[in-house]
Image (spheres, helix red, strand yellow):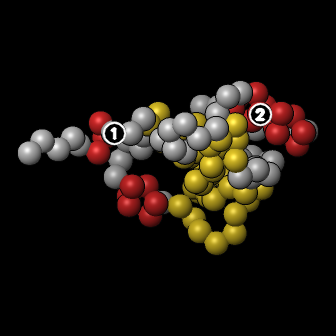
Amino acid sequence: MFYESASSLVDETNPLQQPGHVYAAQIKRGFPVDWTTPGLTITRLRLVSDPGFPVWDVSYCHGLLNGDLVEVQLPFSQLPKKGMRKALYSHAKASGKFIQGLFNSLSTLQ
């Protein structure tokens, strides 16, 4: 019987470059910071969805603040698949701040 590997069944962009448990152990847990916090750089915005479903769900968002990898609180929990970058820009514009690292940090999985 032939089995496909799980990696051939998913469409992923910007995967982690280290095992997930190693990455997760680096995150300072407890109090998420707002995405407009001065000095914060977004390092990873993970979006997940199912093929054919019209929106991305936010799985998590992390950033670097004062040398610590922290959880980041976002003003949204979903983004449309069509026009996702435009929607992100609109959220950032509405916040009145430039969100450092926002577009470089995107990671999607479906």
Image: 93 above or below 23: above
Kind of residue at badge 2: Ala
Where, by quadrant of the figure, is residue 9 drawn? top left
Q: Nearer the viewer, residue 59 or 70?
A: 59
Gap between marks 1 and 2, in whole Å? 27 Å
- The residue shown at (83%, 33%) is 90
Identify the disc placed on residue 74: none
- The residue shown at (75%, 35%) is 88
Image: 108 above or below 34: above
Image: 24 above or below 103: below
The image quadrant where one finds the N terminus is top left
Report which residue position mark 1 lands on: 9
Q: Nearer the viewer, residue 73 or 43?
A: 73
Q: Secondary structure at mark 2?
A: helix
Kind of residue at badge 1: Leu
- The residue shown at (70%, 41%) is 79
Report which residue position mark 2 lands on: 87
Residue 94 x, y percent position in the rendering: 90, 39
Q: Nearer the viewer, residue 77 or 16?
A: 77
Residue 57 x, y percent position in the rendering: 62, 49
